[in-house]
Amino acid sequence: RRPGGVADLDVQEAKPKVALPPLYKVIILNDDYTPMDFVVLVLERFFNKNREEATRIMLHVHQRGVGVCGVYTREVAETKVRQVTNFSGENQHPLQCTLEPE
Ligand code: TYC
């Protein structure tokens, strides 16, 4: 029985149905020109990876062509893509970053 409520016999407990927001993967793509160190820096700066994890992801992308940097809600994922795109352009690197529904 809840404070101010009615007896359990009289009411069905409401199950809170909480909708989780859709999630998006932020993906980086391999290319032949962006320096490995720069990709590691991007993963540290914008995806909060430590050096070891950033290096692991960078090498995965280098070898496999594509890799996941992180999974976020839509607005956060869009912001990460924009930040990486801007930072790469400012540094004259062709690094490509995109988002994909989870
Ligand atoms: N292939 C690049 C090189 O050999 C390194 C690289 C890794 C570039 C991951 C982009 O997303 C990337 N310098």
Image (cartoon, rainbow, N blue to C red):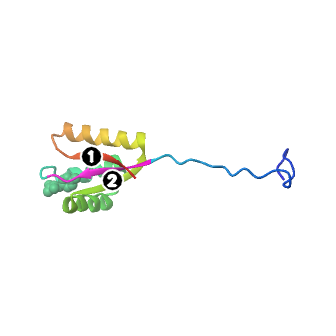
- Residue receiving disc 2: 69
- Binning the other alpha carbons within 10 Å of mark 1 as few (below 14), some (14 to 19) or many (20 upward) gives many
Residue 81 visible: yes
Residue 37 visible: no
Instruction: Indicate yes or no whether the magenta region holds residue 24.
Output: yes
Instruction: Indicate yes or no whether the magenta region holds residue 73.
Output: no
Magenta-drawn segment: 23-31
> Nearest the camera: 42 or 75?
75
Q: Quadrant of residue 78?
A: top left
The spot of residue 56 in percent (x, y) is: 28, 62
Mark sitting earlier along the chain (1/2): 2
In this rendering, the count of numbered labels is: 2
Find out whether the residues at labels 1 and 2 contact each other: C-beta distance under 8 Å: yes
Q: Main secondary structure of the magenta part?
A: strand
For badge 2, the amino acid type reads: Cys
Identified at 86% across, 55% down, the residue is 9
Identified at 29% across, 45% down, the residue is 98
- Residue receiving disc 1: 97
For badge 1, the amino acid type reads: Cys
